[in-house]
Image (cartoon, rainbow, N blue to C red):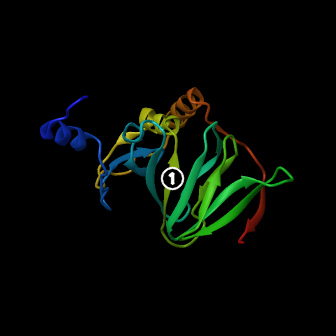
Amino acid sequence: MLHITAEQNEVALSRHNVRKIYKDEGDLIEVLGLRQKWKVRAKDTGFTFSVFEMELVPGQGIPLHTHPYPEFFYVLNGTLDFARLGSDGLLEWVRCRSGESINAPINAPHGCTNRSGGLARFLSTSTYYHEAIFEEVGVAVTPDTPVRPIDADAVQKFMLIAAKYQGFNVEAIDSGRTIDV
């Protein structure tokens, strides 16, 4: 029978135990002018999922895209419109308010934009591969770091790295429909 000493148990628990993540805790990175704060990294979940928090000012958003791993969004504050393809193949928007969620299954085209007049904040949960894209293209910043301008080279770099992890932008004609169920 294996005997674990109190000291060995303490060391093991210090490396693998329940851990509180504080409100302002997390590594902040910038990707194409958007900032996200990692709340949980894949390495901390056995590479099963990761979670980031993002704040979007009015007009900011994430373009319609697809990837072969699911993604879940939970709106913490404000209102966000999530893009999807309607049954007619046109882009439509699903409005989500604080406390509401969106689930994007594997390969489902999705994106979001803050089309409201106020600040919006959400959590996103996905897999390691999603995190890998942002880690490879993102730049570590502090809250005081000025937002870098988005240029064609940065967009091209992002597109190449996303494609490496099978993430692709999706072009669609906007129907102008907003579903507010």
Q: Farthest left residue?
A: 7
- Along the horizontal axis of the image, is 22 left or right of 49? left
| Residue wearing tag 1 | 124
Q: Residue at x 59, y 62 (%)?
A: 101
Q: Nearest the camera: 21 or 6?
A: 6
Q: Residue at x 53, y 71 (%)?
A: 98
Give left or right: position of 111 versus 42. Answer: right
Q: Is residue 179 above or below residue 34?
A: below
The residue lying toward the viewer, choosing from 102 and 151, is 102
Q: Place residue 50 in its image quadrant.
A: top left
Q: Disc 1 marks which amino acid?
A: Ser
- Residue 34 visible at all: no
Return the x and y of residue 158 as percentages of the image width and height: 52, 35
For the C terminus, the image quarter is: bottom right
Specify whether 116 is left or right of 83.
left
Q: How many neighbours does mark 1 have within 10 angstroms: few (below 14), some (14-19), or many (20 or more)?
A: many
